[in-house]
Image (cartoon, helix red, strand yellow):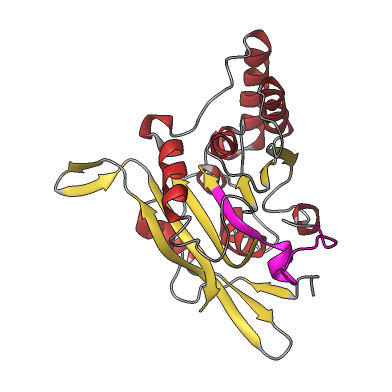
Amino acid sequence: MSADNTTPVTTTAGGEKPAHLEPSKLGTKEYWDALYTREISNHASNPSDEGTVWFDDSDAENKIVQFLDEQEHELFSGIFSRDDAAIMDLGCGNGSLLFALHDDGWEGRLCGVDYSEQSVELARRVLRTRVLGEDVPEFKVWDVLNGDFSTVQARPPSSQQPLEGDKNAGWDLVLDKGTFDAVSLSDSRDSRGRRICENYGARVLQLLRPGGFFLVTSCNWTEEELKGWFETDFAEVYDGTEKKKLGLRQVGRIEYPSFSFGGVKGQTISTLCFQKRDI
């Protein structure tokens, strides 16, 4: 039993997950280490070159920030605000999304994690070239599929927050801009022989506080497929009197320009917002 009294259970209740993607080099750590090594070198030669901003051609970063601004007094009302939100960015890359949130006035804890040491080094170097004042984003090496949760608690146990247990340790908002896409392209398997992307939803659930939100952006999966991946896992929580089931349920989406091909309408990327709630 973990310190936050949450026992996660992975299941396919509610439907099977979507079919897997064919593995590619984008699903390997070696690919990302090499990419960010090059981007560190480029940044050293030209500090204005801060590296790749994923999905920039769809203006995803600006749309994500705009969505969070719009939902601060809607979906997020009574749960967190820009002044106190604990936000984690999974697979932070060069940190651009967290820098954008900081510039937009989100002043709570902003933490980017990545399993690539080179990615985190690039984000830290970019941070040093910016004048951000207090409450700057932090970046650390952490593997979402294998990392120790005790090292990425949103608020330390000694924090004098009006929260308890899972609510104290869990994050208010977890962001993913392309990271699940990369994980989905890995051919690595867990101890049960499953592709490692099968474990992603359950790990996200453990990161979130009850009532917390998960905002995921993908170019590989449609909205319905994202629901299939993230609405089929749940966590069992013992609150001292009974066990409850908590899972992710879609509560919002971001609209992108659409296209039609062969009579089918679609978007080049998809962004869905899920909330951790009773199921």
Answer yes or no: is residue 191 visible. yes
Q: Quadrant of residue 75?
A: bottom left
Which residue occupies the extreme right position in the image?
A: 158
Instruction: Determine the residue positioned at 67% across, 79% down.
Output: 237
Start and end of the magenta stretch?
156-175
Q: Nearer the viewer, residue 178 or 50?
A: 50
- Whole-percent x and y of residue 186? 58, 45
Which residue occupies the extreme left position in the image?
A: 263
* Residue 204 on the magenta segment: no
- Whole-percent x and y of residue 167? 68, 68
Counting every numbered tag in the picture gives 0
Instruction: Determine the residue positioned at 55% across, 44% down.
Output: 179
Instruction: Determine the residue positioned at 71% across, 47% down.
Output: 143
Answer yes or no: is residue 19 visible. no
Q: Nearer the viewer, residue 204 or 212?
A: 212
- Whole-percent x and y of residue 118? 71, 29
Can you say which quadrant of the picture contains the N terminus? bottom right
Instruction: Determine the residue positioned at 49% across, 33% down.
Output: 54
260 vs 195, left or right, is: left
Which residue occupies the extreme top position in the image?
A: 45
48 vs 242, left or right, is: left
Q: Is residue 13 above or below residue 160?
A: below
Q: Is residue 194 above or below residue 129?
A: below
* Residue 164 on the magenta segment: yes
4 vs 95, left or right, is: right
Q: Nearer the viewer, residue 38 or 162?
A: 162
- Whole-percent x and y of residue 23? 52, 43
